[in-house]
Amino acid sequence: MIKITNLNKYFYRKKYNEIHVINDTTLEFPQSGLVTLLGESGSGKTTLLNVLGGLDGFDNGEIEIDGNIIKKYSARKIDKIRNEKIGYIFQNYLLLKQKTVYENLELVLNMYSLDSKKIDERITYVLNAVGMLKYKKKRVSELSGGQQQRIAIARALIKSPSLILADEPTGNLDEKNTIEIMNILKKISKTTLVILVSHEKRVAYSYSDIIIELKDGKVTGTKAIDNKNGYEFEDDQNIYLKELNYENIENDNVKISYYTSSKDKINLNIVYKNNKVYIESNQPVIVLDNSNEIKLIDDYKKVLDTEKAVEVSSFELEKLEFVKTPGLSFKERISLAVNNNKKMKKKTTFLSITLFVVVVLTLLCIQSIITASFVDKQKLTNTDSRIYNIYMDKGSAQIDDRAGKFGFDLFYKDFLTENPEIEPVINFHTRASYTMSTFTQLGNKEYYLSNFSVLPLSTLKDDSLIYGRLPENPMEIVVDKWVLENAINGSTLNNFMNVASFLNQNVNFEYMNSDVTIVGISETNQNSVYVNKWTMIDIYMGSLNKTSITFCSLSEFEKHLGRKLNIELDSRECLWNLSKSTPSTLDYFRYNSDYDMEFTIVKSVDFEGFPYTTIVSDDAYYDILRSVIKREYNILNVVCENEEEVAKVDQFINERKELFASGEIKANLEFGYTGPTPENEDVKLELSATSEYNKKLQPYYDEAKKIISSRVLITFTILVISVLIVLFSMKSFAVSNIYDIGVYRALGIKKSSVISIYAFEILFINLKTTLIGGILCYIVTNIISSIPIIYVDFAISFMTFVLVTFGLMLINIIVGIIPITRYMRLTPSQILTKHDL
């Protein structure tokens, strides 16, 4: 059952030219029968039919179709109902003109589970029924208007719908084909509801069961046609004599048969002379001879008994079970996209050139941004990024260096107590020499490792090793890959060695008496060398060339010996290497008495090849480290492994700032205070923290930021221009194909299928422009950069090529389908209206 209740639709609503095209209409249609919507042009017939068929929306009211209640236009819901229940005969045919007759009908059958044989049988049957079988393989564009109308009718009949909506189905047919089509529709109406739009009263009254008359959007009358008079053939040429009044005028010289349908008086002067007839009349005269198509027929005009004609009609087609919303096959969508590209070849030329240029410029800009944003920390720094620098400054306080050293000493001890997990280190730089005896080509030339930080092994994570192992004694070290790469690159070693070649290589730090061995190579992305903590102190003192004394702990010495010694050392006692000349006491710093630590030699022993001068207790490490750090008492360097530890150091410093301006620290410093009387003025030691590593890199980051800003602006401009060109080009393509888009949607083809056609279209354009342009740009820049004499160190990386090229293709596809997506929001009727405009 189909029922509409209080249905309203407006054109140009709330505007000065508003038209109330469906005006508060309520109708209920029968389950079957042929119902004609009759009215003059502009009465709202077609609009009402479009709303019923889901081709157009409505403003308010309600439509019910077989229990499906529609109060608001929903494309998904309407499409399902239209595909499942409705066959539509369009006034303008709405055939896909580039396709064959067979393909147009096959498209409608996609929603049913039919094999190719059954599809072919069904198409053959309906084409034969409408007299178009011989045109099955012909393109629609090659058919006449009347032939296209019959194909459109066949398409509506082929799925045996429960409702047929026919908009002027015989408007372009001759009388013979009109009768054939109306007979088929009438026969179908015995079991199916057929709603017909027509302005021909003769057809309406001959075939309709119900006639609904409309005027200005309103229903003006409903008539049930019970006694049909039959279909009277319309023949404008022939004159049927028996339908006219007859009078015979005859005498000896003339015989005149006079036929008339009116009582108007005519005046005739007839002259016969020289075998010719001359007629003078007060009415126009038409002479009928062999050259005239009008014939006089001594009979009545024919009237077709439509009831009997319908019974004779043999049209029978089984119902089909709806399976799915029809869509276009993958192959068909590809084919349509290719054909669209061929049709729009001239229009795509400018777009193709634009996309080619855009991908090249974008690749160059993006790569330059990446290059500019990459600050080569490996080459530009010689400090580990984890080293955090804490400074103590006397500021305006009038205290001498001894007082400052004392304040720093208090701070140092306090820091170690509060932050045992944060390692204090010595931030210094040295170099280590080595010879490559394993390569005869290199001879005995001396090479150097340089520009690195020396850190204790405790700052190296076990999983950072990529080659070798961790050190097992103080004479073994781990070197980071960066340090070794810096040594190899740009030197003759590059031709002979790689990073792994340095394993088990002996190196000698400046002013150290013994070599150490590289037993492990790490990947921490730091310019750092990792050594035993005692070795770190000895390397530092060697780099200063301040002392020939080298320290190591008792536990390391015992590990070297492989046995325990029955010796206990306190923090100021030591063992002396028997092979060295023995002083009574050992001053660690000989050159500056302010910073000395004094050790008492309790025994001289045979070190059995252990390459140190002095053995101290394990507890002496932090005292010795403190004495080394106090050489420049205003700097404490610590290793912060993460941002949390940096924040902890900052918090510690902020809390101590108040302490170091307090009376407590002032009292401790009074012996070195030289300023005003302390009762009214604080002694203030200023604390601050920073990262020298970051300070060194900051200028490069600032410069990179400037370059990146300009490149980003250029890239953004290029992309905006590209997007606009793609958008307007695809909008132009969509407008050019708006008819096909409207046809697909009117037939209920899924929106996704229609959109995908144009997605493939822009994809194919991108494949021959964006992809090729990207490949060429990648190849050319890499070839140029590989030629040494050109000195161009700029090439598109493979990752940049992939991300930018395919990213642009994706953007182009998304932007390209926007115009189509916008059309998909319209009703089929609205889309087709744009084509008509």
Image (spheres, helix red, strand yellow):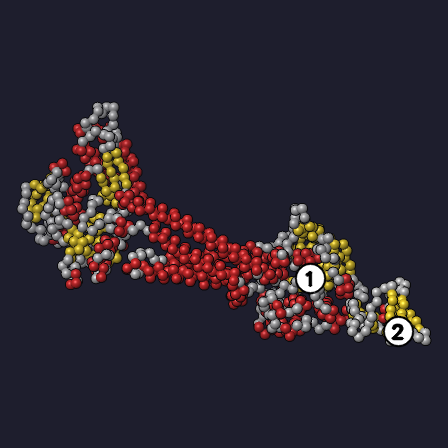
Q: Residue furthest front?
A: 274
Dot 2, how many residues are within 10 Å of its Cα: few (below 14), some (14-19), or many (20+)?
Answer: few
Inspect the image, locate mark 1, and give the three-letter code of the amino acid beneath it. Asp
Q: Position of residue 443 (x, y in %)?
A: 14, 61
Give the left or right position of residue 782, taking residue 270 as reference. left
Query: Which quadrant: the N terminus?
Result: bottom right
Choose top left, top right, bottom left or bottom right for residue 235. bottom right
Separation (CA) of disc 1 from disc 2: 58 Å
Circle 2 SS class: strand
Choose top left, top right, bottom left or bottom right for residue 151. bottom right
Q: For residue 167, which numbered disc appears in the image?
A: 1
Near-viewer residue (445 or 568): 445
- Examine the rendered structure and indicate whether residue 136 appears above or below residue 371: below
Give the left or right position of residue 431, taking residue 711 as reference. left
Residue 577 visible in the picture: yes
Dot 1, how many residues are within 10 Å of its Cα: few (below 14), some (14-19), or many (20+)?
Answer: many
Near-viewer residue (295 or 770): 295
- Examine the rendered structure and indicate whether residue 500 appears above or below residue 385: below
Q: Position of residue 413 (x, y in %)?
A: 21, 38
Circle 1 SS class: strand
Q: Residue furthest right?
A: 252
Q: Residue at x 11, y 49 (%)?
A: 612
Q: For residue 273, which numbered disc appears in the image?
A: 2
| Mark 1 or mark 2, whichever is nearer to me | 2
